Amino acid sequence: MNSVIAPLCCALFLLFSCCAAADDVTTFKGKSVDDWIYLLRKGKDSRTQAEAAEALGYIARSSKMTEGGFSDLPYDVPEPPQLKKEVYAKIIAALEEGLQNPDATVCRASAVAVSWIGPRARQTIPLLIPLLTSEGRDVPEKAMLALGQMGPAANQAIPHLKKILIDSDTNTQVDAASALRRIKANPEIYVPTLIALLADQDMNHSASIELSHLGDPAVPALLRAMKDNNDNRRMYAAYTMANLAGWKKLTRNQEEVVTALIVLTKDKNPDVVYKAIQALGSVEAVPEKSIPVLISFLDHKKPEIAREAAQSIGNFEAAGQPALNRLIDELRHPDSDDSWYYSNVTGAILRIGLDRETAEKISQLDFRKIPESSTLLLIPLCEYPDLALNFLKQNPAAVAIWPQDYEALRDILRNESPAYHGLRSWLYESDQLPLAIMAQTADSRFLPIIRSRMKNADAHTKTLMAACARACGAPSDRVVKISATRPGDFKPASAWPGSDPRRQSKEMRGHGDGSTEVIVTGLILGEDGQPVTQPHFYRINDSWLLGQKKKEEVPLTYDEKTGRFVFVTDVFAAYDAGKNQPEPGPYQTGSSMVQIEARGCKPLKVQFYDEMPEVEITLPDAD
């Protein structure tokens, strides 16, 4: 069970989230351009008119992504269409009327629509400029957005935007600076305002993001800000440097930046120090100066600073080689229970690279105090099977690897080369291998280990272990038959929207949403009762029940001679915790929707649940 505390879903108001397939590029939501123009002009209320304005902007949009409307990020938006000139002209003429509408809702929506169209709507610039001083709610902000999206074509707005930088509230100042940046105005006009706002507790992040987008031209002012008396300004100057580097917008002055950041690591404010260390790892320059400084913070009394130092060292990858011995020493003598820190140290070692000398040192360490780190190291160590074997003998819990490493360990279990013989033998005798790996290996040698582990397992885990045993050759006590006409007669009590009362607490209820692993075993046959050829499983729903459509091929273990398969998946799971909870396990679960395809057969959609028994799936013949 991989459980994380997270919301099941988030409510979003997406005006364009249900973009039905249009009859042609000039149709949206079943209405033509002329229909939307009519609604913009004659709609029954301002809301209808505003929706019409945004619909017209959507049809004539200049890029796939849109911002600033009812939804800042509509998903599943197709590439913009190529419209005839007369259609653009008609749309823009209607939006010009919308920009002059006295109703703020309609005016604002028209500005948003124009921002989506961009430079093609440059003729609206004279109408947008007066809106900068409008008293309508959010109208000036959307006008600034639209002017910025025009790019250099809107340079006549620069004097008006400069005035806003001086006379307006801080939120509007950032919007004005953003517009000036997009128009490509001289950075000297707006950078001082953004630097000043780095000290503002409400606007420092927004100002930092704008400076980060600007790139190299912001660096001189940021270097000065790193010496400022204001703690917030110093901290956000370093934070901005980190963003600049992370977004590949810091292309020069790197040595000067590194020198300034090193000075900032001596700051009296630990928050400033943290951001400086983070920025050194983002800039990834001048390692001969940066790495020694970062090493010195590995034993810092503040855990978050020590963690960030390890993370930043790892960012240098091979250039972080001088830090290897110190990083290994941190693993050799763990002196805290901060597993996050030791995971960062381990991650840094792996990103720098494991040569045989480094692998040998690590293989001799005892990870009982930091078992999470051992699971991260196992797969990379397997490049040297003799060292991996020594490592496992001392750290047997290291086989409890993360799911992203399952495939690599399965490959090792199947590797019959002499060099891997000892390692494979040890793994086959391990009583701590993840059940998914044993199931997908489908080897009967695991059966005694599975049966032994079942003795002390809770009821929910026993169900998973029973599926693992079936995968390895144990008989089944129930078979669910599934076909195009028979969806199957199994659904656990926990299946959404139901819930399993056995796993709910009656008192002191705590709650966590996550996922639970499911192992499905059975047969895939054709209508003639024979095993199908080359089956493929495609997951078509997301495990978090967010309604996201997808078609993603997932791993499948399949024997074409017998038709037997093993499929490991995960489903949404809600967990309860507290007193008087009779039984462990998720009280509510989702399902894994899979489309099965095979040569000579029609696709079949199958729903797999938690605690699924053995299944026999019959695929319909192709026409």
Image: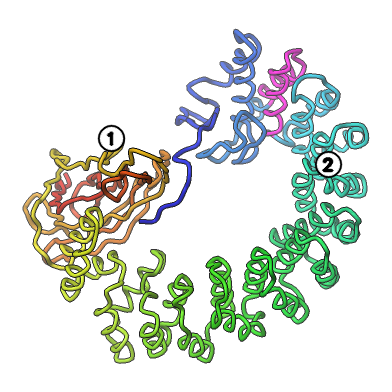
The part of the image, by quadrant, that contains residue 496 is top left
Q: Is residue 44 above or below residue 221?
A: above
| Residue 257 placement (x, y as % from top left) | 83, 67
The part of the image, by quadrant, that contains residue 398 is bottom left
Residue identified by numbered label 1: 498
Question: What amino acid is found at the position of numbered circle 2 in the picture?
Answer: Ala
The part of the image, by quadrant, that contains residue 53 is top right
Q: Is residue 522 above or below residue 49?
A: below
Residues in magenta? 89-117
- Main SS of the magenta part reads helix
Residue identified by numbered label 2: 177
| Residue 339 placement (x, y as % from top left) | 53, 67
Of callouts 1 and 2, the N-terminal one: 2
Element carrying mark 2:
helix
Residue 478 is a magenta residue? no
Category of crowding for the residue at label 1, using alpha-carbon neighbours closer than 10 angstroms: few (below 14), some (14–19), many (at least 20): few
| Residue 491 placement (x, y as % from top left) | 20, 41
